[in-house]
Image (cartoon, rainbow, N blue to C red):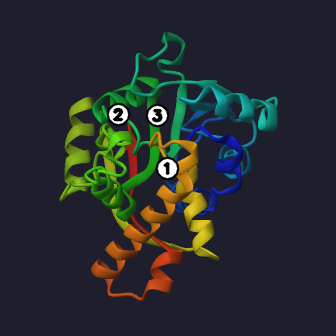
Amino acid sequence: MNNVELYQKYNRVQAHEALQFLEEYTKKLHWKDGATVMDIGSGDGKVTATILKNYLPPGTRVVGTDISERMVNFANKTYASDDIEFEVLDIEGELPAQMRGKFQQVFSFFALQWPEKIDVVYSNIYNMLADEGECVLMFLGRLSFYDALRNFSRNSRWSPWMQDMEKYLSPYHDCQDPEKEIKRLMHKIGFTDVDVKHKSKSFLFDSAEEKMKTLSAVNAMNIPNELFDEYMEEVMQEICRIDRLNRNIDCSLAMKTLYFNVIYIYAKK
């Protein structure tokens, strides 16, 4: 998950889904001249600088944030400009005072499935927003990759390196009604206008290898380097087994297709 080079090469799913999400949601936003916006979980900076920036009014400043210092350093070196900068931020940690009430919009693409304390995340986003500010968030809900990891954590071959696996699952992977749960929590925090959609998605890769590399780029398990390729090949086989069982599809399609549920959130302060 900290391999910048691998992530930069294999993040086609993230870019594709961010583009679709912005096409739908930026039409609903209320822009202000000279505003500052944030992208939470900006990773290598590519989506922030080459996709999100294109949907913002001229003169908008963008602050991309990520918990990984390596990602932030790479993003600043590669994509920073007069109106784009990148900073280290733990979105489920203590919020820096200078970020309170600063942002007209807060965006996030495929990042908020990582934090454990999702209530803290929503509270921090609320506190970062200016009066009547808005957030538009997209992240993973259910994913067969998570089911495969859960199964592997019980396997004696791989369990020694997967003791904390559960904390890397989406907080809504096992949730039966994420729309209802998210609305309840965000209204409790203070958001006045909350819209949540839970969508089933799929992405067809050019090859099974590309799918494996994409999942490798976001792997959070501390598997030894000499065992990692073997581990990922077995994970791919397990994902294929789960998807064939649940979706009644053939192996060749299962090996090249990523099936996932994604959560879209619009909320106003």
Residue 133, given in percent of the width and then of the height, sits at 46, 34
Q: Nearer the viewer, mark 1 or mark 2?
A: 1
- Marks 3 and 1 sit apart, C-alpha to C-alpha, by 21 Å
Q: CA distance from mark 2 to mark 3?
A: 13 Å
Whole-percent x and y of residue 261?
A: 37, 63
Q: Quarter-wise, where is residue 70 in the image?
A: top right
Residue at the spot of label 3? 133
Identify the mark nearer the N-term, 3 or 1. 1
Q: Report the front residue among 121 and 71.
A: 71
The quadrant of the picture occupied by the C terminus is top left
**Residue at horizontal 56%, vertical 56%?**
229
- The x and y percentages for residue 190 are 27, 31
Under circle 3, the secondary element is strand
| Cα distance between the residues tagged 1 and 2 | 15 Å
Q: Which mark is residue 122?
A: 2
> Residue 8 or 157: which is nearer the viewer?
157
Q: Which residue is mark 1?
A: 110
Q: Secondary structure at mark 2?
A: helix
Quarter occupied by residue 37 = top right
Q: Is residue 84 visible?
A: no
Q: Residue furthest top?
A: 97
- Type of amino acid under label 1: Phe
